[in-house]
């Protein structure tokens, strides 16, 4: 596959840009693969990429029922940060954040990582104490965050109203190396790099059953026929419960819709990410000028991938006190994704009751930022059959043993 570069743009310009290759191949499935990854979201694609890159496992297929990146990966609000409370979470999220630093170069694909900084507002005394505690934990974990006062918040985000009558801003947890990346580009970059290694990405191919014999997976049934495999990795976010049921085990997961919306494009007004968890809203500005706004998760389980009027109203009403500037803006689009929530709001990267079947899910409302670290850790788990240090605390067995990794506050989005 030809490398993307400034030179390549100049070369292709000379032939009216008609010579670009397809970014990834669209093969028919082979009869058998060493590893099948179900789900071509960011986590599935990154798993396949690091299987090939770090472990030399390249007879791999990524099977996707829709189009790659069309699940939560292409529906999220692209916030990247690693300011979690517990050590295992801080480790995997910081691994991901640091991989994002060099991801465009590694994949030879511009994922538009923009470390513009992330503020998590404290709008109650309780929240202020919580963020101070997280800042102290982050110091011990080697993660670069600090608790800043309201005056500093106002300097960083001049459009913010820190004197709201109901929810004044008391301070914030500030991670200046947090930020955003272009979500589709993350999926496309991994897909292209996988394809260049000979990994098959098979879209429009739904997995309908998991075949097994003597406690091991032998293959899958799909809408494009049966495919055999040596190992199976299930990486399907909101559909994890459905796939687990096909494989014959149960997961401590609930699926709910999480919604977001964007405004009409305006001139640059905010050059950082602001999360206001007490009022259930968060905001940043895209390169196109739209304000990217998200709210809390639905209060009931469902599989709807669309927005609702109630959330638009609740989220905007909540944010207007803190950002009066948005009160006259028109909202352009809204949407939803199905997120997979565990009880402790931490992910599952785990072996399963089937010896050669592994699962990566439970990233809930916060897995976009984790994609590179999660793929790295999942590839190690699948290749070696045992979790490495990044995945060790995220096994399914923690729910039986009561060894929770409680991130219900640091998860960031009210749920
Ligand atoms: P997905 O991208 O959903 O991929 C799973 C894939 O599996 C899908 O493409 C699906 O079609 C496929 N699949 C399902 N069933 C089958 C089957 N039977 N056969 C074949 N394929 C199947 N996280 C952050 O870190 N920052 C944010 O700002 C953020 N904002 C969010 C905002 C919203 C509105 C939403 C919905 C989520 C947000 N998240 C955020 C969470 C983040 O998007 C997810 O945690 C992450 O994208 C999950 O990636 P994934 O690869 O696991 O899942
Ligand atoms: O996890 O940072 C996050 C997040 C922000 C919006 C949705 N999730």
Image (tube, grey):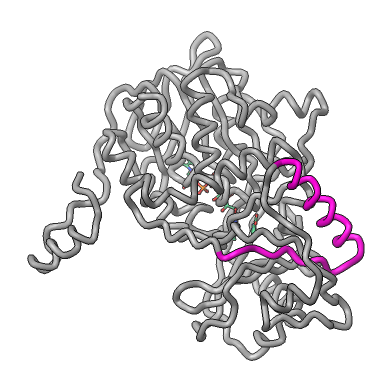
Please state if 39 lies on the left or on the right of 20 as rendered: right
* Membership of 120 in magenta stretch: yes
From this view, report whether residue 121 is shown above or below residue 136. below
Magenta stretch: dominant SS?
A: helix
Residue drawn at x 17%, y 57% as measured from the top left:
20
**Most distant residue in the bottom direction:** 328
From this view, report whether residue 205 is shown above or below residue 10. above
Give, as a single range, the part of the protein colored magenta.
Answer: 116-141
Residue drawn at x 42%, y 44% as measured from the top left:
65
Q: Position of residue 37 (x, y in %)?
A: 44, 32
Q: Position of residue 162 (x, y in %)?
A: 80, 80
Q: Nearer the viewer, residue 235 or 309?
A: 235
Q: Position of residue 71 (x, y in %)?
A: 49, 52
Q: Nearer the viewer, residue 179 or 285?
A: 179
Please state if 35 lies on the left or on the right of 31 as rendered: right
Please state if 89 lies on the left or on the right of 95 as rendered: right
* Membership of 80 in magenta stretch: no
The answer to whether one can see residue 302 in this image is no
Give the quarter of the image for residue 106: top left
């Amino acid at each position: 596959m030809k490398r993307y570069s400034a030179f390549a743009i100049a070369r292709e310009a000379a032939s009216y840009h008609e010579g670009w290759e397809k970014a990834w191949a669209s093969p028919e499935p082979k009869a058998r693969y060493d590893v099948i990854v179900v789900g071509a979201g960011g986590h599935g694609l990154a798993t396949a990429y690091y299987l090939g890159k770090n472990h030399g496992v390249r007879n791999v297929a990524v099977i996707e029922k829709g189009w790659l990146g069309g699940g939560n990966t292409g529906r999220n609000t692209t916030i990247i940060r690693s300011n979690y409370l517990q050590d295992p979470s801080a480790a995997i999220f910081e691994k991901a954040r640091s991989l994002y630093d060099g991801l465009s170069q590694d994949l030879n694909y511009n994922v538009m990582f923009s470390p513009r900084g992330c503020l998590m507002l404290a709008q109650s005394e309780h929240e202020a104490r919580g963020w101070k505690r997280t800042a102290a934990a982050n110091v011990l974990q080697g993660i670069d965050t600090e608790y800043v006062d309201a005056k500093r918040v106002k300097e960083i985000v001049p459009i913010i109203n820190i004197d709201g009558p109901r929810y004044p801003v008391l301070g914030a947890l500030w991670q200046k190396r947090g930020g955003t990346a272009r979500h589709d580009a993350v999926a496309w970059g991994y897909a292209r790099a996988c394809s260049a290694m000979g990994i098959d990405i098979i879209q429009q191919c739904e997995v309908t059953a998991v075949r097994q014999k003597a406690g091991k997976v032998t293959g899958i049934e799909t809408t494009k026929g049966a495919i055999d495999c040596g190992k199976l990795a299930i990486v399907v976010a909101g559909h994890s419960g459905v796939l687990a049921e096909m494989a014959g085990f149960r997961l401590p997961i609930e699926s709910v819709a999480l919604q977001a919306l964007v405004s009409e494009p305006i001139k640059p007004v905010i050059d950082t990410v602001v999360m206001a968890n007490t009022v259930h809203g968060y905001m940043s500005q895209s390169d196109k000028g739209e304000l990217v706004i998200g709210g809390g998760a639905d209060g009931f389980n469902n599989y709807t991938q669309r927005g609702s009027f109630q959330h638009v109203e609740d989220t905007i009403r909540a944010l207007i006190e803190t950002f009066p500037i948005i009160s006259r803006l028109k909202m352009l689009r809204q949407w939803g994704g199905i997120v997979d929530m565990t009880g402790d709001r931490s992910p599952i990267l785990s072996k399963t009751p089937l010896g050669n079947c592994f699962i990566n899910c439970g990233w809930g409302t916060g897995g976009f930022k984790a994609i590179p670290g999660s793929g790295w850790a999942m590839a190690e788990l699948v290749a070696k059959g045992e979790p490495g240090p990044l995945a060790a605390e995220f096994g399914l067995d923690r729910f039986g043993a009561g060894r929770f990794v409680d991130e219900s506050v640091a998860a960031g989005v009210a749920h």
